[in-house]
Image: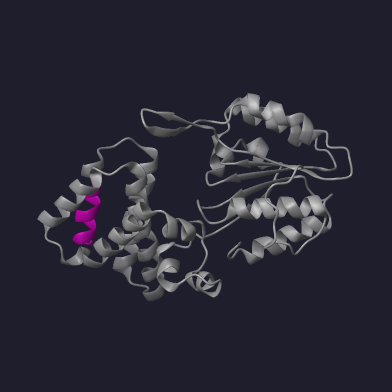
Amino acid sequence: MIIGHEKQRDFLERFVADASRHHAFVFSGPEHIGKRTVAHAFAYMLTQGVVGTWDSVVQMHTDIVTIAPPTEERKGKVVVRDIGVEKITEVRGRFALAADSSAKILIIDNAHRMTISAQNALLKTLEEPSRKGFVILVTHQPGQLLDTIISRCVRVHFTTVATDVMIAAGVDAQTAQDAQGRPGFVRRIATDIAFAECIAAARTALQTLAKQPVSALLDTAADLAKKDDAYIVTFFTVWAHRVHAAAHATGNAALLLMADRVDSFLRMFHTTNTNKQLAIEELLLRINRRS
């Protein structure tokens, strides 16, 4: 089921009605908001040449192929690898030379994980499109794609989904809030106990933050630093979502500053190697003293 993204869906339906208008798309936006689900639904409609089937999608279709970064297990951990040129070369001929009456669609999930060689191989397909071949790139890091690829694609940007839209779709109020505007989190909250507990812990910590003495904040930082990176990112993403929502609702300058602090921490955490405990300590202390 697709929740939200009505404007994006309306926009895409125009291409189904006139499939000759373009052959390549970049679906960008935050993780877990439904980009991949929309991509599969859009791809299915292209194969059928009809619109309005967003909620009755056949995910498996012989004319739709999805490529995603391969994974492997190392020392008990799942490691995500890049998409190599060999994989793109393997499927390129089929989708570049689609000549029969039915559309052929290639979906590349987490497209930013393509190597430069893989992107260059894909570029050859984009430069010589076939009438019935389509490529959909799904990514939350479009800046990692070559400019020459981006320039040949229609860009469709997705944003988080409003809580009231999730509730209207049948999601209970607490889960809708905890999902942080990401429909992909709804099912995970219901099925992944550790994930749900992380979100609940983040919610509680945020509610009690202002009442905590420095010693308690340092203890919290020490406890969080022992968690894996995914837990820490989820924990502070909960904070970012809730503080942003409160800041926009109230216009409170202190909340806006707090939201900026959390956003800066998440950007730093994603892009640099740093001492996790010290970074978390600094964030908690700066927020606590509103500096």
**Could you tell me residue 133's position as x and y percent?**
79, 41
Q: Main secondary structure of the magenta part?
A: helix
Q: Quadrant of the N terminus?
A: bottom right
Q: Position of residue 231 (x, y in %)?
A: 34, 48
In percent of the image, x 72 and y 50: which residue is there? 43
Residue 83 on the magenta span:
no
Q: Where residue 126 sits: x, y (%)?
A: 74, 36
Q: Is residue 80 above or below residue 226?
A: above
Which residue is at 25% across, 38% downward?
A: 275
Q: Is residue 290 magenta?
A: yes
On the question of residue 263 being in view, the answer is: no
**Range shown magenta:** 279-291
225 or 21, nearer to the observer:
225
Instruction: Please name whichever residue, 120 or 289, is drawn nearer the observer in this view of the structure.
Output: 120
185 or 286: nearer the eye? 185
Residue at 13% x, 56% y is 216
